[in-house]
Image (cartoon, rainbow, N blue to C red):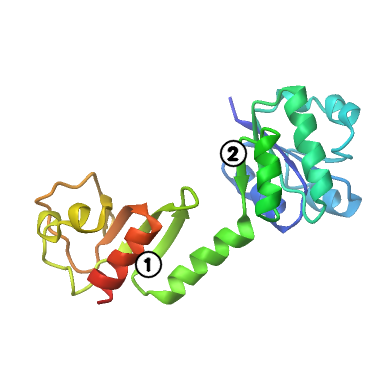
Amino acid sequence: MKKEFAVIGLGRFGGSIVRELMSQGAQVMAIDHSSERVDEFASIATQAVIADSTDESVLNSLGIRNFEHIIVAIGEDIQASILTTIILKEIGVQQITVKAQNDYHEKVLRKIGADFVVHPERDMGIRIANNMLSNTVLDYLELSDEHSIMELKANDAIAGYSIMDLDIRAKYGINIVGLKRGADIIVSPQASDKILLGDIMLVIGADVDINRFVKKALNG
């Protein structure tokens, strides 16, 4: 069975989610109060519907409770985002992901029961900043406010050393959980595994510790 999603709010963020879910073979209902946006996604989503998501009777008529995961991607209207989330929780939706405009919005969303809260603009800004500050940081995934997973490119400073030689866990409190070497991926590398020039290290840990490792070991 294909997974079923509903995306409420078809702005840039919500629209990109609809397109990606559809490309992955999911079933997607695209919902927005704007007829123009709904028309745009009529040929992209499984179903595109004009609806007011702050009206519980409207959501019930769409059978919204039957969807496995709802993404609330409403843009600037924080009140509509909050009201929609409350209604979805009361209806009994299994999983709700909501786009937050700011930290205060996130606090309210978490208090009313949102399962996942995302800050697309902030998170993308952090990722871009990390990539610009260091040519060793290839990608960045925020796990929490203080912890992340980063893809770091091995350079001359650490190439040829084993993970044991570098003693990364003891010195920096972070862990290398994977190595990408060309088309190969080494999951949970051994302490004796040597890091080669150009290897991509998948590193997990506290942001301050990863940044310390990047500055001292890679860019030092």
| Mark toward the start of the polypeptide (2 vs 1) | 2
The picture places residue 210, in percent across and down from the top left corner, at: 33, 60
Which residue is more in the foreground, 196 or 148?
148
Which residue is drawn at the image coordinates 67% and 32% (left, top)?
A: 113
Which residue is more in the foreground, 205 or 151?
205
Q: In the figure, is residue 196 to the left or right of 113?
A: left
**Circle 2 sits in a helix, a strand or a loop, which is it?**
loop
Labelled disc at residue 137: 1
**Circle 1 sits in a helix, a strand or a loop, which is it?**
strand
Q: In the figure, is residue 143 to the left or right of 192?
A: right
Which residue is drawn at the image coordinates 56% and 42% (left, top)?
A: 24
The relative height of residue 220 versus residue 94 in the rendered view (above or below) is: below
The picture places residue 170, in percent across and down from the top left corner, at: 18, 53
Q: In the figure, is residue 14 to the left or right of 124?
A: right
Q: Which residue is mark 2?
A: 25
Q: Where on the picture, by quarter, is residue 120?
A: bottom right
The picture places residue 105, in percent across and down from the top left corner, at: 71, 49
Q: Where on the picture, by quarter, is residue 211?
A: bottom left
Q: Where on the picture, by quarter, is residue 124?
A: bottom right
The crowding category of the residue bearing disc 1, from other C-alpha atoms within 10 Å (few below 14, some 14 to 19, many at least 20), is: many
The relative height of residue 213 versus residue 142 in the rendered view (above or below) is: below
Disc 1 marks which amino acid? Val
Disc 2 marks which amino acid? Gly
The relative height of residue 26 versus residue 184 in the rendered view (above or below) is: above
The crowding category of the residue bearing disc 2, from other C-alpha atoms within 10 Å (few below 14, some 14 to 19, many at least 20), is: few
